[in-house]
Amino acid sequence: MRRPYFLVHLAKDLKIEWRSKDAANAMLFFALLVVSIFSLAFDPTDPGLHKFTGAILCVAILFAAVSSLNQVWARELQNQVLDAQRMTNASANDLFVGKVLAHFFFLTLVEIILAPFFVIFYNLSVVGNAWTLAVIIPLGTWALVVNGVFFAALSMRARSRELLLPLILLPIFIPALLAMVVSTSAVITGASDPGLWIKMLAVYDVIFTTVCLLLFDIVLHAEG
Amino acid sequence: MKLLRWLWLAATLGVLAEGFRVAMFVVPPDAAQGDVQRIFYYHFASWCGMGLFYLINLLCSVAYLAWRNRKPATALKADSLAVTAAEIGVVFCTVGLATGSLWGRAVWGIWWTWDPRLTSTFILWLIYIAYLLLRRLAAGPQMRTLAAVVAIFGYVDVPIVYMSTRWWRTQHPQPVFFGGPNSGIAASMMPAVWWNMAGWMMWGIWVASLRYQSIHSEQLAEEEEARQSLEAAR
C-alpha cells in the first residue's frame, strides 16, 4: 500500500529538522530564556508563587511556539513547494497535517526538555495527579500548533507577517490558553478538579482542528 | 438614494430621541438598582447591534468565498459589506464593553472581572480588531480571501459569548431575555428596550450605508487603477 501523503510530509519535515535542528534549537533556547526571565521577575522562593507556576509554564510554551511559528512556512516559500503541491494530486490538507504533526512533535520535545529546568528553577512539587499534566499539556500544545500553522500560512504573504501572526493567533488561542492555565494550576496546587477545563480544551481542539482542515486549502492557495 | 439616506437619518434621530425620552423619563426605575439600571437600554441595544453586524460580516465573508471566482463583481460588493459590518460591529462591541464596565462599577463596585461572559466578549472584540488589522496589513485580492477565513474563525466565538451565561455561573447577570424561570424584564420597561434597539440598529444601518459606499468606491478605484496599469504595460 502506498504511504499516505501526510506521512510523506511528516517524514520530510522530521528529517530536515533532524539534520539542521533550526526550529528545535530556537524554540528550546527561547523557552529557557523566558523561564529564566520569569524566575528573575517573580521570586521563585515565594510560596505564594506556587499557584502561578502553571501559568508561567504555559506562557513560556506560548512564546516559544510563536517564535518558531514565524518560520514554519519559510522553507516551503523559498523552495517553491507550494507550486509543486498544486501540481500534485495530494490535497493541501496532507501538507497541513504533516506540518502540524511535525511541529507538535518538536514542541513536545522542547516541553519535555524544559520540564526538569522548570522543576529546578521553581522547586516545583505537584500536589495533584502529575500524570494529568501529560494530558493537559499535549492538548494545549495541539491547540496552539494547529491554529499557529494555519495562521502562519494565512499571514505568510502579508506585509509585517511576524506582527500579523501573533495578532490573529493570540485572541483565537486565548480560550485554550485559559483552559490550559487553569487546569495546570489546578493540578499543581491540587486545589480543584481540572476535569471541566480538560473537557473544554478537548472540545476546543476538535472544533478548531475541523475548521482549520476545512479552510486550509482556501488559505494556502489564496490568489484572490 | 441620497434623499433616502437623509430621510433615514431623520427617522433614526427621531427614534433615538424618543428612545432616550422613554428610557430616561418614562419607564420606571429598577426596583433593586434604581436609576442606574437605565444604562441597560443602551447596553443591550449595542449588543443587538453587534450581533446583527457580525452576522452580516459572516454571511458576506462566506458569500465572498463562494462567489470570488464565478461572480467577481458581486463578490467584491459582498467583501465591502463584510468589512463595513465588521467596523460597525467593533464600534458596537466597544460601546457595549464600556457601558457594561460603567454599570459594573456602579453596581458591583468593580470596573471589570474575568468571568466567562466578559472574557469571551473581550476576546471577540480582539478577534475582530485583528480582522481589521489583517485587512490593513495584507495586500491585494488574496487579502480578501484571508480576511473572509478569519471572519469565519472569529464567528465561532459568538455562540460561546451568547451561551456563556447559560453554561457557566458568571458575575454577569443571567440571561434577561429567553432565560430560565424568573428571568425576563418587567413589561413596563419593554418600550425603552424596543425604542433603543430599533434606534441603534437604524443608526448602525445608516453609518453602514455611508461606509459601504466609501469602501466600495475605493475598491472599484483600486481595480480600475490595476486594470489601467495592466493595459499600459501591454
Image (tube, helix red, strand yellow):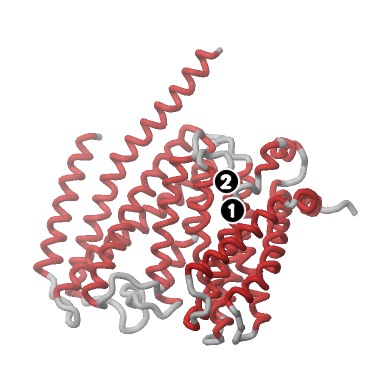
Residue A154 is labelled as 2
Residue pictured at 57% horizontal, 50% vertical: A151
Badge 2 crowding class, 10 Å Cα cut-off, few under 14, some 14 to 19, many 20 or more, is many
Residue pictured at 72% horizontal, 39% vertical: A81
Which corner quadrant holds the C terminus of chain A?
top right
* Image position, residue B197 (x, y; %): 25, 60
Q: Is residue A59 above or below residue B10?
A: below
Q: Nearer the viewer, residue A103 or A41?
A: A41
Chain ID for label 1?
A
- Do we see residue A210 in this rendering? no
User: Picture quarter containing residue A188?
Assistant: bottom right
Residue A67 is labelled as 1
The amino acid type, in three-letter code, at marker 1 is Ser
- Do we see residue A33 in this rendering? yes
* Image position, residue B58 (x, y; %): 46, 51
The amino acid type, in three-letter code, at marker 2 is Leu
Q: Is residue A49 above or below residue B84?
A: below
Which corner quadrant holds the N terminus of chain A?
bottom right
